[in-house]
Amino acid sequence: PDSGNPARSRPPGRPGAGAVTSATASGAWTLALQAVDDVAEATCWLRFRAPGRLEVEPGHFFMLSPARPSGVVFLGRPFSIGDVRGGEWHFLLRVLGRGTAWLRAQTPGSTVRVVGPLGRPFARRPRRIHRMVAGGVGLAPFFYLARRLRAEQPDARIELFYGERESAAHA
């Protein structure tokens, strides 16, 4: 069976076969924060209006950083796309340090530099059962993945195994 590893699915004697053959165009935008929705202790959804008709797939991630030098955050922070709906991009954030604290302190209307989509999206092969395992904010991409799987494979069973280090993190 295919493990999802391109190196294992590569036919012998054909270098590069099985590699990603199409890429999603990435971009950089300064976007106004539309909403901050608190969901648990130090955890919230950040929502941004998606620019244009960019194809964003479950498993893609974006780098979020200040639109202008902040004196607090220098490098962008990676966030998996948590959902795409209603013309908005949703990112799940948990305050864990200086950069995420800065992002959480932003209010609707504040501008953030958003770079992406980056990375390789999840493969969505037809299956009877899809099992997903996540911990902490690693849960983020599975919301969008589960919704897309349900739309593409309505009869498939979708199971999520999820854990947290602290009970206060459970919403």
Image (spheres, rainbow, N blue to C red):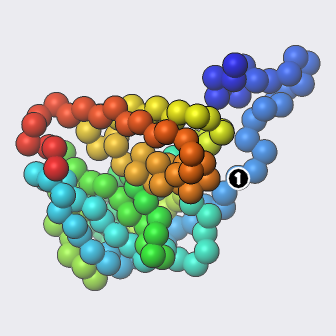
Residue 98 appears in the picture as rendered? no
Residue lying at 46% horizontally and 69% vertically, measured from the top left: 85
For the image, the number of numbered tags is 1
Return the x and y of residue 62 as percentages of the image width and height. Answer: 46, 56
Residue lying at 17% horizontally and 62% vertically, measured from the top left: 38
Q: Amino acid at mark 1?
A: Ala
| Residue placed furthest toward the right | 13
Return the x and y of residue 36 as percentages of the image width and height. Answer: 23, 69
Residue lying at 8% horizontally and 42% vertically, measured from the top left: 168
Q: Is residue 125 left or right of residue 33?
A: right
Secondary structure beneath label 1: loop
Residue 52 appears in the picture as rendered? yes
Q: Is residue 149 left or right of residue 21?
A: left
The quadrant where residue 19 appears? top right
- Please tell me whether residue 167 is drawn above or below residue 59 in the rendered image: above
Crowding at dot 1, Cα within 10 Å, few <14 / some 14-19 / many 20+, comes out as few
Residue lying at 36% horizontally and 59% vertically, measured from the top left: 91
| Residue placed furthest toward the front | 155
Q: Is residue 45 left or right of residue 146?
A: left
**Nearer to us in this view, 60 or 133:** 133
Return the x and y of residue 160 as percentages of the image width and height. Answer: 37, 36
Q: To which residue does mark 1 refer?
A: 23
